[in-house]
Amino acid sequence: MFLVDVVSGLLRPASCLACGAPGGWPCCARCLAGPGDVGPWPLAADPDVALWALGPYRDALRAAVLAGKLDGQPAALAELGRRLGAALAAAGIGADLVTFVSARRVAGQPRDHAERIAGGVATALDLPLVDLLAPARGRDLGLARRAAGSGRAPPPRPPPPARRRLAGGRVLLVDDLATTGRTLAGAADTLRLAGARQVQAAVLATGPAALAGVAGGGR
Ligand SMILES: [Zn+2]
């Protein structure tokens, strides 16, 4: 595993994942401007959860996230996570530990995107990264939606189980994207039931439905 990480680090492309500018890996300054407005905004699916993000899921940020997820560039996700963490530090976020939305393997492939991003966030914030959540039981939301094939909303998925209990504390929950925000809301419920005093969420990018007060929010 260590060797793989070293090799993928050595072989990573130097160019911007979004526009191809040389030396801009993972995202050049033109494509991903310095920390702008990173939140927090209330999560539509649970307004008690403050949501932070590098930006909306479009344009250069979307290209960089997709490249990190689909082109096997875990180092890019960790670096984008580090930038997210640095922006949260600049915004003065208060948290005691970082955890992430855990996903089951699909067809034998690990889906550790959120863990990679959370690692970068935790490093930038100098906070411990703790594996608090087990993968949710039930069907994968995207797979269930495709299987339904009718555009109807899939049945709600049960929240993920907690791996351990907490004695209070402020938890920063990390995922790659917030689309509906329901995954984050379910995970936040679990963390509070497990003893967390406060849960905030941070993602690389958000869709409009994830944010309260935006048209289409809450779905
Ligand atoms: Zn670029």
Image (cartoon, grey):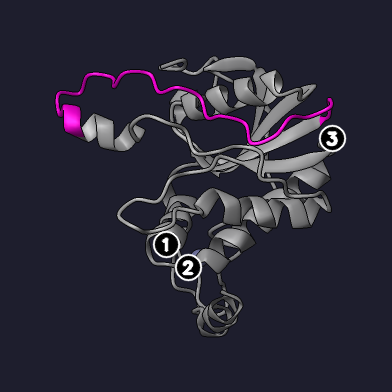
Side of 90 where 30 appears, left or right = left
Q: Nearer the viewer, residue 30 or 23?
A: 23
Which of the two marks, 1 or 2, is nearer to us in this view? 2
**Within the image, what quadrant is residue 29 found in?**
bottom right
Element type where label 1 sits in the image: helix
Three-letter code, disc 1 = Ala
For the C terminus, the quadrant is top left
Q: What residue appears at the point 42 percent right and 62 percent down from the top-left corner?
A: 67
Q: What residue appears at the point 72 percent right and 36 percent down from the top-left corner?
A: 172
Q: CA distance from mark 1 to mark 3?
A: 30 Å
Q: What residue appears at the point 58 percent right and 82 percent down from the top-left corner?
A: 3
Q: Earlier in the sequence, mark 1 or mark 2?
A: 1
**Within the image, what quadrant is residue 63 found in?**
bottom left
Q: Nearer the viewer, residue 53 or 11?
A: 11
Three-letter code, disc 3 = Gly
Q: Assess disc 1: are there few (<14), some (14-19) or many (≥20) residues with their C-alpha within 10 Å of its C-alpha.
A: some
Element type where label 3 sits in the image: loop
Side of 154 where 24 appears, left or right = right
**Callout 1–callout 2 Cβ contact below 8 Å:** yes
**Circle 2 residue:** 73
**Circle 3 residue:** 94
Where 50 falls versus 28 (above or below)?
above
Side of 85 where 219 appears, left or right = left
- Is residue 83 in view from this perspective? no
Q: Is mark 3 within 8 Å of ligand 1?
A: no
Determine which of the numbered discs, if any, sits on residue 67 in the image. Answer: 1
| Residue stretch in magenta | 147-169
